[in-house]
Amino acid sequence: MNADAASWHPMWLPAQATAHLAGRSVRLGASVPEAVRIEAAAAGMRAVGDGERADVSIGMSSSHALGTPDDSGTTPLGPEAFAVAREAGTTALVAGGPPGALYAWFHLVRLGAPAFDDALPPTTVAPAHALRMLDHWDNMDVHPVMGQVERGYAGGSIFFENGRVREDLSRVAAYARLLASIGVNRVAINNVNVHAREARLITGDDLADLARVADVFRPWGIRLHASVSFAAPIRLGGLETSDPLDPAVAAFWARIAADVYRAIPDFGGSS
């Protein structure tokens, strides 16, 4: 991740989006993701320690009791959930895990100045669906009919250039930030109509490049997916069939899957 937040593309988050946070103090728990720390610094917030008063506190716990009497028990939080409440002049956010902390940060941004109103109601936010995914129809090569992005109307791919994963993935990082701000947690980066070039994306040197994309997505709580070719056992494995019931085909896919998850342990499709 680029630590120089000022060099990031603003996307929909220009400086005025965080104007209500500038100059305020923030206390961040030890396990809060680095992305949140960088975002807070970029917004002009001043970090304070545990013993100091903070305008905002962001921490992580598997449960919370924000905005409730001490004897009323706690509410469990999943890894993508968070709670927010005003407590003794502090806007307190508690997240169930790193993704939840990211979503809590962007919730604070969306609240604007009312985030510091003592009338702010206690709220617990959890995603209604575990899988929140975008599916790109990008080609690694420029297709003679469909172009680089099938049914795309806004230029070329931000992932691929000249038949390879781009060397400069800074636009992908800005895109990942945008997606995190609206809670998207999965992205498939290539066309579901997998052409010959894209069929090799999960093998060899291309797999190392694919891992670079996953590395850019990961700090923003996004897991990478890729479309594969049903014909890969023939195209890549030299087999005579792609029948998934054929033992040789099953062995081919087992080997490919092992290679992929070795390079990208959180690749889409794993538990």
Image (tube, rainbow, N blue to C red):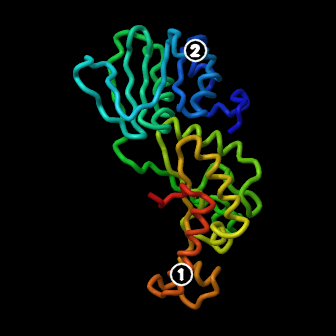
Label 2 vs 1, first from the N-terminus: 2
Marking on residue 251? 1
- Residue at 63%, 28% (x, y): give it: 38
Residue nearer the viewer, 182 or 81: 81
Q: Quadrant of the N terminus?
A: top right
According to the picture, the residue beneath numbered tag 2 turns out to be 48
Please state if 119 lies on the left or on the right of 179 as rendered: left
Residue nearer the viewer, 8 or 31: 31
Residue 236 position (above or below residue 100):
below
Find numbered disc 1 in the image and state the secondary structure of the residue it sits on: helix
**Marks 2 & 1, CB-CB < 8 Å contact:** no
Residue 225 position (above or below residue 86):
below
Q: Quadrant of the C terminus?
A: bottom left
Residue 253 position (above or below residue 117):
below
Residue 100 position (above or below residue 261):
above
Residue 67 on image: x %, y %: 31, 18
Residue 82 on image: x %, y %: 40, 31
Residue 44 on image: x %, y %: 63, 17
The residue carrying pointer 1 sits among few (fewer than 14), some (14 to 19) or many (20 or more) residues within 10 Å by Cα, namely few
Picture quadrant of residue 88: top left
- Residue at 34%, 27% (x, y): give it: 64
